Each structure stands twice: as structure tokens, then as C-alpha cells.
Amino acid sequence: MGFRSDSAGIPGGREPDLESRSFYRALLDSDGPAMFIARIAEDGTFVCESANAGLADIANCRLDEMIGKAPSDYLPGEVAANLEAMLRLCAESGKQVTYSMAYDGPDGRTAWTTNLVPVKENSGTIRHIIGLVRDITFEKHRQVTADRNEALLGQVGLALPQIYYLFNLKTRCVHHIAGQNSKPQGYEAEEFFQLGDEVMPRLIHPADMAGAETNLASLAHLRDGESSIFQYRIRHSDGSYRNMLDRQSVFSRADDGSVELIFGIAEDVTGQDRMREELRGLSDRLLTLQIDERRRIARDLHDSTGQHLTAAALALARIGERLAKDKARIVGSSLVDAKMSIDEAKKEIRVLSYLLHPPGVTGAGLGSAIRSFAAGFGSRAGLGIETRIEPQQDEVADEVAVAFFRVLQEGLANVHRHSKATQVVVALEIGRSEVTLLVTDNGVGFEDGGLEPCDQTGVGLRAMRERMIRLGGSLRLYRDELGTNLIASAPRFRT
């Protein structure tokens, strides 16, 4: 493998003994680091006296092309000149020299690091230098890639409207943070690092700290590929608090498999939350206007249309009384039909007026309002309505109560107009976190996929479903052998 057996192959120039020869043969014949022995000639030049196969691979030439030759005889000019300069520095200083170099050759870019060790004779003269060469092409490539990725992340950090970071669950420190135009919430990245394990109590709103602690505990059990979403308020550098929506996932684990680093992407949703509040306020104002409009229509129906129908019924009665008996027999049946139609119209007006202007919801509570409305609607529509109310927790957000009350209105209105039912069961259950309303009747049901009623108040099944979806709930309508069932459910409180 390139080991020379003559005395010139051993640093010091003396005849080698068996032990030293075996030592150098073991070094030069090993598959370890690339190695060579350079001899300093009388004219001060350097000659490769011994080398192993590892060096031949790096130099991209055969061993017999290297042994007894100067570096310029088997290495590219730039590489040879650099090696000779470093060999001279090592010989003149008498100290170890380490240097690295990269070279763009025909087969691509190659990089290596070389350690040069001077060998002193007993007289102190340096005649040989041992060189150890390590190929660092892959390491160099990896470093270049890492530098490029770091630069790319820096550019991404300048552009991203979100904040991305690495958080250590064990030390509770931020390891990396960037984004939101390079100053997350108005701070320099270094300010987050300086806070250490105080970053959470110093920046997160005190009212949100308990939730943040609970979220951290859950992140410790997060599986790879899963993500967690948490919303909290963080203090901006200007002193205000901003609403943040944080998506977190596992970035790395410790040797024991426990979660160590968490990767998070936090988005400032303060503007979005404000917009949602404004939309909610607008929706509430529209609902108030709608209620006022319904109240006006109900009052007009009762005070005007109802009175006209009553007057028409009285007029028909007087006509029947004044007709001669023979004429009364002729028109009697028509008068009866007219009276029946007027009575039915008055009944529909009473029902419609009650739908348009029902009892209040927010004052009496949802359970009481539903019980009162069901009883009043049943008496006006001629329906037998049984109410089953289990208000385990009677407190319900006003918006939720109004939405469920409207769903009950539309549900009973559809029963009255379409089902031909005689009996209805209204069941309300107010649980710890959810409200559920069931309206079931013994009517004729509906054709599959064909029910999309739109009652005279301008809303129907689609409106009921949208009310529940807006609250984060759902609405389901299905038919069985007993009749039609409507089930609405939603959280008790808006989040």
C-alpha cells in the first residue's frame, strides 16, 4: 500500500528496527485517514517519501505517481503550491500546521483539511513532515447547505406575516423566532432569548396563563404529525395586547423520546377578531330591526286585518238573520262556507301574529320561553304539544337562546303548515356545555330530499341550519315510522 522498506521510508533516515517498521507499515497500510511522509531534500524542496491509498484517492492518482515526486509533479498547480507553502511553514516554525482548502476539479468541487506534523531528529533537525489529510467535501457541502438554508429562513422571516418559532418544553425558552416582518410583535429576536424561561409570564396576558400552562402540558403528549391550536393574548412592544392564533407541532424529541422542541406558527388575528365582533354587532342590529319589523306586522295584522275579518263575519251573520226563510235555505250553505273561511283566516292570523311577535326570550330564560311559546302556539294552532324541559343549567347566552327559540318557531310553523300532525313533543336539554332541542311530530312526514319549506316569515330549513352553524352547532332533520324529527344542538356559550 505504498510503504517503502528502505531506510529512506522512515523519518530520521536511520536503519529501522522491526518495531518501528511495523509501526509505520500499520499506519500507512490502514484504511484510516489519508497519510503521507514528506522528506525535505538538500535543496529545500519537498518529496513524497511514503503515502497510503487514502491519499492517492484524494489526490486522484496512483501511488507510484506520487512516491519520490514533488507535489507539483502529481497535484494541480494551485493545490501543489499551497501544500508546498504549508510544508515550508511547518519546517521553518517547527510547529504543527493545520489548513483547509477546496478545489474545483473536473469531477466537481473537493474540500479537505490537512494536519502537518514536523519530525525532529535527535540533533533537532527537521528532515521529515508527516501529513494527515481528511476529506471534508461532504461536511463542506453540508455547511454550505446549512448556511444557504439559514439565509433562506432569514429571507422568509422578513416576508412572512406570521411568526414562526422553536420553543423548548423542558427549559421553557425560545430557541429561534422570526417572521412578522422580522420584528415579532415589535421585539428583536434577541429580546426573546434574553427573557429565558420568563418569556411566557412576561409576555402572555395574565388571564391567559392558566390556559397556556394547560396547553403546554398537552403538547408534551403530542404525537408526531399532530398539531395543536391555541389562542391567547401577547403583549406587544407598544404595551397593547394582541390576539394570537398559534398552531404547534413536534419539532424534535429528546433521547428518551419525550417532546423537546415545539415548532409553532403564530398569527396575529386581532384585526380578524375585531371584524368578527363588528359583524356580530351588525348581525345583532339586523336581528333587532327584524324583530321590530315583525312586531309592527303582527300589530297591523291584529289591529287592522283581524278587525276587518271580524267585521265581515258579523256582517255575514246579520245577512243570515235578515234573509227570508226560503232565501236563507238557498244561500245558507254559502254563508256557512264563508264563515268557516273567515274563522280559518282569523286562526291563521292569530298563529302568524304569535310567530311574528312571541314572548320574550332573554328575560324569562330559554326553558320558560319555550314552555310558554309551545303552550300558546298549540292553543292557537289546535295542536297537542307536550314539552319536556331539563334545564340542568338554566344559564344560556342570549344569542344562543334567541337562535334556539327561532328554530323552535320555524319547526312548529312547519309542523302546522305541512305535516297534518295532531301531536307534537318539544324536548329541551341544557347540559353543561351543549344545548339540544328536539321537535318530533306524528304527521305525514316529507319526501326524502324534498323538504325545503319557506314559511311566510321569510325563513325556513336553510335559515334554521345556518343559525346553528353560526353558533358552531348543527341541525338534523329525519323521518321515521312515527313521524318527523328535528334535532338542533349547539354550545351553550359563544367562544
Image: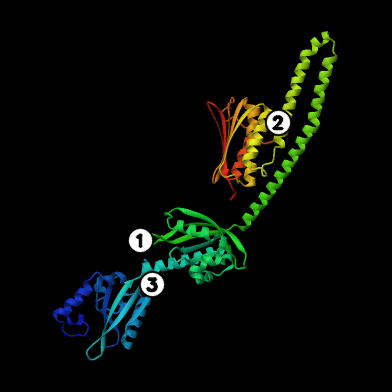
Nearest-to-viewer mark from 1 and 2? 2
Which quadrant: the N terminus?
bottom left
- Which numbered mark, 1 or 3, is in the foreground of this view? 1
Amino acid under label 1? Asp
**Whole-percent x, y for residue 273 in the image:** 62, 55
Can residue 473 be seen by looking at this rendering? no
User: Which label's residue is closer to the chain start, 1 or 3?
Assistant: 3
Placement of 242 over or under 420, stated as above or below: below
Q: Amino acid at mark 2?
A: Val
Say which of 387 and 161 sits in front.
Answer: 387
Q: Residue at x 38, y 62 (%)?
A: 254
User: In the image, what residue occupies the spot 34% across and 85% down?
Assistant: 89
Residue 130: % across, % down: 27, 80
Q: Position of residue 375 (x, y in %)?
A: 65, 32
Residue that mark 2 sits on: 351
* Horizontal arrangement in the rendering, residue 16 relative to residue 334 (left or right): left
Crowd band around label 1 with a 10 angstrom C-alpha radius: few (<14), some (14–19), many (20+): few
Looking at the picture, which amino acid does disc 3 mark? Tyr
